[in-house]
């Protein structure tokens, strides 16, 4: 019922070689939604290349005295359709709180951008058995009655090569789904993120409550990213 969404987070890296060429694997696919979150500098190139994309972060105010920032409105006006909100690297590097993330998510919705909101616990929080409490608090402030996508990204699995087991991921995804209001529960997509690669994509994407992936490292390798998109296509 839910179409897979495979999203690439290029972080602070340039577009991979060939990514903006016609026919690249980052462009729209028939059976799977493919989205890229490039740096601000590569947004225009992605839009010109007809790649669905959005910023990795955007200011909630439309314009003003916020040196170094780019607003969600500016991204919308450029032609973006999506916005990444609350990635754990933004939470850690820029002190974004759950409330800041919710404000970005709401601002994106108001502009007609589709928010992909990241949640997830750190390793020490999981070791202390608090992973569900942490994720519940991150989810509780979000406008779950609206059309948003949630990305469960255990912080200990991002860029580390450690992946949540399919069982660990499924358990958390089912928990997140249980927190979504009933009328949105079956339609809201919940992506998994954290060292998803071609060799673990099948078992992760096969889980009942995993509706796609948010992919960092492997999204910078067009062949790997393409293989994950193909896997999602074959599971559709
Ligand atoms: C991410 O940046 O959202 C991510 C999941 O990174 P990686 O795939 O490299 O773990």
Image (cartoon, grey):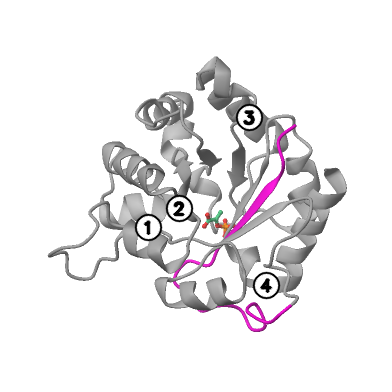
Sort mark 3 into few (<14), some (14-19) or many (20+) by Cα contacts within 10 Å: some
Image-based side of 73 in relation to 79, left or right: left
Look at the numbered disc 1 and say if its residue's Cβ is closer than 8 Å to ligand 1: no
Tell me the element at label 1: loop
Q: Nearer the viewer, residue 188 or 163?
A: 188
Q: Locate residue 107 relative to residue 49 in the image: left or right.
A: left
Using the image, tell me which numbered label, if any, was put on residue 187: 3
Q: Is residue 124 above or below residue 67?
A: above
The local secondary structure at tag 2 comes to: strand
Q: Residue under label 4, please give it.
A: 221
Residue 93: image x %, image y %?
31, 58
Q: Residue at x 74, y 51 (%)?
A: 32
Name of the residue lying farthest toward the right: 234
Q: Are marks 3 and 4 in contact (CB under 8 Å)?
A: no
- Image location (x, y in percent) of residue 65: 12, 65
Is mark 4 in CB contact (under 8 Å) with mark 1?
Answer: no
Q: Quadrant of the C terminus?
A: top right
Placement of 143 over or under 13, stated as above or below = above
Tell which tag, 3 or 4, sits nearer the viewer. 3
How far apart are the alpha carbons under marks 2 and 3? 19 Å
Closer mark to the observer between disc 3 and disc 1 = 3
Q: Residue at x 29, y 66 (%)?
A: 70
Q: Contact (CB < 8 A) between labels 4 and 2? A: no
Q: First in sequence: mark 4 or mark 2? A: 2
* Number of numbered tags placed on the structure image: 4
Q: Which residues are magenta?
A: 1-22
């Amino acid at each position: 019922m839910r179409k897979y969404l495979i999203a690439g987070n290029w972080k602070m890296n340039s577009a991979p070689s060939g990514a903006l060429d016609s026919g690249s694997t980052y462009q729209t696919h028939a059976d799977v939604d493919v989205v890229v979150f490039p740096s601000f500098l590569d947004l225009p190139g992605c839009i010109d290349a007809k790649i669905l994309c959005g910023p990795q972060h955007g200011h909630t105010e439309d314009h003003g005295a916020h040196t170094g920032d780019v607003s969600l409105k500016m991204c919308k006006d450029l032609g973006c359709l999506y916005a990444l909100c609350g990635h754990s690297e933004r939470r850690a590097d820029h002190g974004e709180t759950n409330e800041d993330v919710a404000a970005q998510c709401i601002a994106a919705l108001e502009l007609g951008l589709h928010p992909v909101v990241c949640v997830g616990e750190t390793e020490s929080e999981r070791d202390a058995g608090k992973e569900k409490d942490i994720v519940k608090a991150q989810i509780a402030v979000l406008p779950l009655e609206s059309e948003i996508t949630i990305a469960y990204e255990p912080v200990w699995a991002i860029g580390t090569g450690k992946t949540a087991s399919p069982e660990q991921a499924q358990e958390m995804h089912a928990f997140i789904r249980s927190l979504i209001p009933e009328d949105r529960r079956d339609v809201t997509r919940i992506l998994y993120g954290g060292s998803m690669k071609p060799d673990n994509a099948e078992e992760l994407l096969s889980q009942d409550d995993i509706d796609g992936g948010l992919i960092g490292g492997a999204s910078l390798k067009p062949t790997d990213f393409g293989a994950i998109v193909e896997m999602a296509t074959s599971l559709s």
